[in-house]
Amino acid sequence: MTTKFPTINSTLSPNALAQLIQQQYNLSGKTKCSIFRLAMNHLYIVNDNDNQYVFRVYTHDWRTKSEIKEELRLLLHLKENDKQAAYPIADKSGEYVQEIEASEGKRFGVLFSYAKGTKTAKFSSQTSFLIGKALAKVHQSTEGFELNRISYNSENLLTKPVLRIKEFFPKNINEVEFLEKLSAFLTLKIQNTGSKMRYGSVHLDVWFDNLHIDDEKEITFFDFDFCGNGYLCFDISYFLFQLLATNLNEEDYQIKAESFLKGYETITEISNEEKQFLPFACLAIMTYYISVQCDRFEYWTNIFLNEDHLKRMVGNLKRWIAYNKIEIE
């Protein structure tokens, strides 16, 4: 007797998705769909004559429909205010979220505009200036804009993530002990922040992989999957951390970092309190992301998620700590 075997993470047929998208969005019969990336979520490139889109299929049991709608509400808010972010596209009935019955259960799909330009980690200090300027414009619209999603505080960035990491990795390895000590140190830093910290909706994953550069003139951000509520300087700090991680020459990093901050402050001032918090914020975010990798181990390429990977991740944290001359008390 043949039975349908349960799955946890299927790959949807690009051809079948092309038909679904063509029908739901009234695209032409020339609509084509191809796999772009199978990772935390599954991304497909959609082409219809000269028009190009991105269709994201959220992995099963990753985001609720209400969480996705909040992400899209933020993106539509940015679109209404002419900010530089890819935006969701409604189907013929005015709906933004498609429900797809996959073999593992219900999954959600959203069609997004395609961000103009290209992705590169090798950008100039002038481009870094433009990225800072564009992020500040986004923050102008997201300050005070509250989402019905996660709030990035010490509990969600540090306390819970460290517990999850300890469940996944052996407790007696040095890296886990380091993260426990770092978490206690950062918790106090977050709890002691004051009133001059701007708060609102944050992207939380601003780096070269989630933005396109168009002819060294225009920046478009995308992939707001981790958006939530938090200090706006979380985004600034995370970008700087990733900038250091992708620039081994620290002189190059410093030039680009200064240019990024100058670009940001041509639009919005970064308070002294925020500047003082920048060296610490990204360390909390990276601790959170290590725990996310543990949580999603079975849903993406997981061969790298081992003790060696944890050592590399912690090594990057220690490099940042050394560069910023942070002493963990």
Image (cartoon, rainbow, N blue to C red):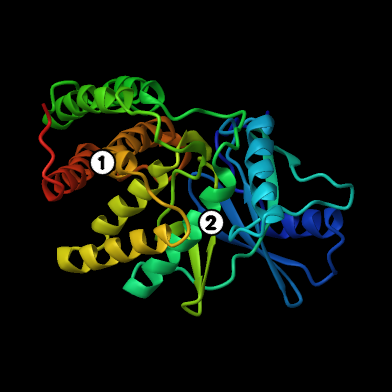
Using the image, tell me which numbered label, if any, was put on residue 27.
none
- In the picture of the structure, the residue carrying the numbered disc 2 is 137
The residue depicted at 19 percent of the width and 47 percent of the height is 320
Q: Amino acid at mark 2?
A: Lys
Quarter of the picture holding the C terminus = top left
Locate residue 237 relative to residue 179 in the image: left or right.
right
Q: Is there any visible trace of residue 68 in the rendered image?
A: yes
- In the picture of the structure, the residue carrying the numbered disc 1 is 276
Image coords of residue 318 (percent x, y): 15, 43
Quarter of the figure with residue 152: top left
Helix, strand or loop status at disc 2: helix
Contact? badges 1 and 2 (CB < 8 Å): no
Helix, strand or loop status at disc 1: helix
Locate residue 155 relative to residue 79 in the image: left or right.
left
Most foreground residue, 302 or 174 = 174
Quarter of the picture holding the N terminus = top right
Most foreground residue, 184 or 299 = 184
Mark earlier in primary sequence (1, 2): 2
Q: Is there any visible trace of residue 3 in the rendered image?
A: no
Image coords of residue 197 (percent x, y): 40, 36
The residue depicted at 57 percent of the width and 29 percent of the height is 149
Most foreground residue, 58 or 92 = 92
Quarter of the figure with residue 99: top right
Disc 1 versus disc 2: distance between alpha carbons? Answer: 22 Å
Locate residue 233 relative to residue 215 in the image: left or right.
left
Image coords of residue 248 (percent x, y): 18, 63
Q: Is residue 249 above or below residue 76?
A: below
